[in-house]
Image (cartoon, grey):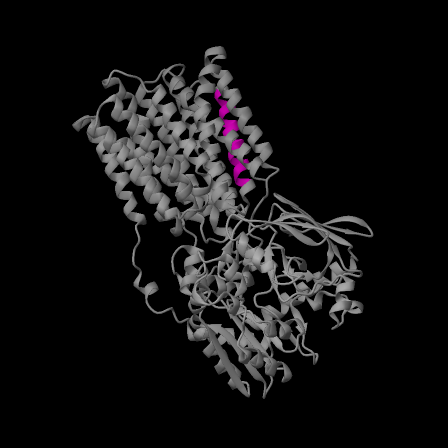
Amino acid sequence: MIGRLLVCAAGAFLSMGLLIPAVPRYVTGPLGQQAGMVGVSLAVTAVAGVLARPLAGRVADRAGRRTALCAGALLLSGTSLALLAVGHLPLFLVLRGVAGIGEALAYVGLATLASDHRRPGAAINHFSVAVNAGLLTGPVIAETLYAASGFAAVWVTAAAVALGSAALGLTLPKTTSPDTESASPDPGTRRARPHHTSALRPGFGYLASVWGYTAISAFLPLHLAALGGSGGLHFLVYGGVLVAIRLAGYRLLATAAPTRLAVTSLLLTGTGSILLAAWPSPAGTWCAIALIGAGQGLGLPAFLRMAVHGLPVRERGSAVATTTAFFDIGFLTATLALGALADRFGLAGGFALAGVVSAAGALLFLPVRHHEHEGAPLTLPPADLSGYADVVFDVAVPLLADNRVLINAEIEHAPLARALAEAAYARGARYVDVWYFDPYVKRSRVRHAATASLAEVPSWLDARNDELGRESGVLVNIRGAAAPDVLAGLDPVRVGLDRMPALTSRQRLQLGNLVRWTIVPYPTPEWARAVFGEPDQARLWRHLRRILRLDEPDPREAWRQRIAELLDRARRLTEMRLDAVRFEGPGTDLTIGLLPDAHWTVARLEDVKGRPFQANLPTEEVFTTPDYRRVDGTVRATRPLSLDGTVIRDLELTFADGLVTGVRASAGADVVRAHQATDAGAARLGELALVDRSSRVGESGITYLETLLDENATCHLAWGAGLPPGVPAHLRTDDPARLDAAGVNTSRVHVDFMVGGPDVTVTGLGPGGKVVLLRDDAWEF
């Protein structure tokens, strides 16, 4: 998809670039106007683009990105072609205004599609390269066409290129939220406004950056003329530096903190502009151009990443529209202000003001201490905690009088642990045992303890689990890392040896359903920082509250209905009698064989006494246990994975005859290798799960760096132990040898990693041939 998106973007902006030199020449030529009217025509286009941005954002969010970009490209094509018949200024200005609307729609649709990509940082950066490629090459091509065949050739070429972009755009994903119209907004999120509040800060930063860009685009030719030169080569160098930064530094632009990139961009741009004023010489000009080009190269990817980061799919179009509107606002305000200042104080005054504005914009992104975030973690509203506990003990693990309850938590999870204890005792629990784990203590152990001791587990922890199993009690595991990257930088082999807080005795309880067990999330400041770049625990809770359906009038009934929907989907998959499932997408071509009479199910299970429970909340998946011996090909993870205190990024696994034969990752590969060396089954698959885009987790558009959430956002696989509920009834047994002979994997580990997304197609292979199960994250059957 990304290749088609980039070609589409390059074409749309090439269409715009073709008109850059042609419009001024046409206004002062065939239309017979003065130079001032050139500015008016440019202003009409810019103002129409600004006014159309809110509409473009709503179209992209509600009707789809594809609709926005295709509508915009068609408007660009039609207005360019109509110029063939225009001989009067009023109609020309109308067409330029309509073209401004087309530019807004196309830009917002394309940029939002890039932000939807599974690697949004890289996609936005590549998109910005395509934009500049079109805008920089358009004027060159236009001059050639005009010299050969006049204005008609330019208009027709611009129309044809835009039409081609519209046609190619039809092949791109529609990409709308499945519940765009019906979803109730989260508390505290925006209502209908002409702008998106989350995009205002990056938008103002973009405006400040545009002042520096305007200083050279509008006034550099005059500056060079005063020095006795011309600007052609300087603009070529500017464009070359900008594109080089985005191509050579694409990894940095895709992964570095966007606030740091924004500060660097604005300081470079501001320094370059001030240098033009302070060092009016050929050498000073070359240095200034290089600095401004570098600053502009860093800027746009950073501002767009900030605008959409952490936003659900249904709001990204509005955020992109708000941010990009500041380009036109900045260009208009800078042109007027710098021109007036240059008239009064000379070009140096204009350059100096542009530099000050750009450099001052960096202040928007300097660290600010938010006292409400830096102190004690936020305590959630008591009503939310109470309602959450009700869902846990009435839906997830229905509690009976005299039950023993065991709760595993980290220190930051204490408010939820206490609410659960209150709810459990109110329902007649016999005893509630809460165990708090501290990841910082684990870090000290990994750093200093003897290597031979790292795999040891205190016997009392196993005894605690074993006793709960004998009594068929209730187990609640709270997730939400207090420090997701707490083990970063430590020896990955030593990290892999210390499995705490994961215990084999607890895994035995869960895999054998010896107790009613569940896993539930709780927001922490550091988890929020890992997700949003700031410790905004309240913002994370707003997302979790919706995902957990606590925003529904009756959350318990809402969960019962959702679980029933998933059970029906699992039943239909089982009835297909599939023999294998194939995943195909960028970097992925993996075929997974299934067990005979493959059984699909959901996380709605029964304990050994036949009592139902829900193994995790949220839940959005249907899954089966595959035949571990029949897995071949390569699969690329589509989301980061947090494993044993390390964030694994860009993971790729290669399988041959069911065994992992290759592990690659841009970060954390050694941790994965150490984990998969735990035992013979750790490097084989134990689960295949399918998730469609109706998932509220996926709909949020956020990577949570927590498997409990991320596995319910998209399709996933798991290396390690096969899940007994996904094994056909006739193959279920407690005998490991018989399970192995049947193709059911056994292991002390079980790790989910995410492999689905809109670019990944999932196909079932069965008695009736091939059937597409998921395409563009939507069910096809």
Picture layout, residue 392 above or below residue 114: below
Picture layout, residue 22 above or below residue 698: above
Image position of 478 (left or right of 366):
right
Q: Quadrant of residue 629?
A: bottom right
Asked if residue 617 can be seen in this view, the reply is yes
Question: Which span is picked out in magenta?
Answer: 67-83
Image position of 364 (left or right of 138):
left
Give the residue at the far right of this rendering.
Answer: 767
Where residue 169 appears, as percent x and y from the top left, is: 58, 36
Most common SS among magenta residues: helix
Where residue 559 appears, as percent x and y from the top left, is: 60, 69
Where residue 299 appears, as percent x and y from the top left, is: 38, 39
Q: Is residue 137 magenta?
A: no
At a point 43% along the width and 39% down the height, the residue shown is 52
At a point 48% along the width and 30% down the height, the residue shown is 13
Asked if residue 552 can be seen in this view, the reply is no
At a point 31% along the width and 28% down the height, the residue shown is 289
Q: Is residue 73 magenta?
A: yes
Where residue 700 appears, as percent x and y from the top left, is: 51, 56
Relative to the observer, which residue lies in front, 13 or 495? 495
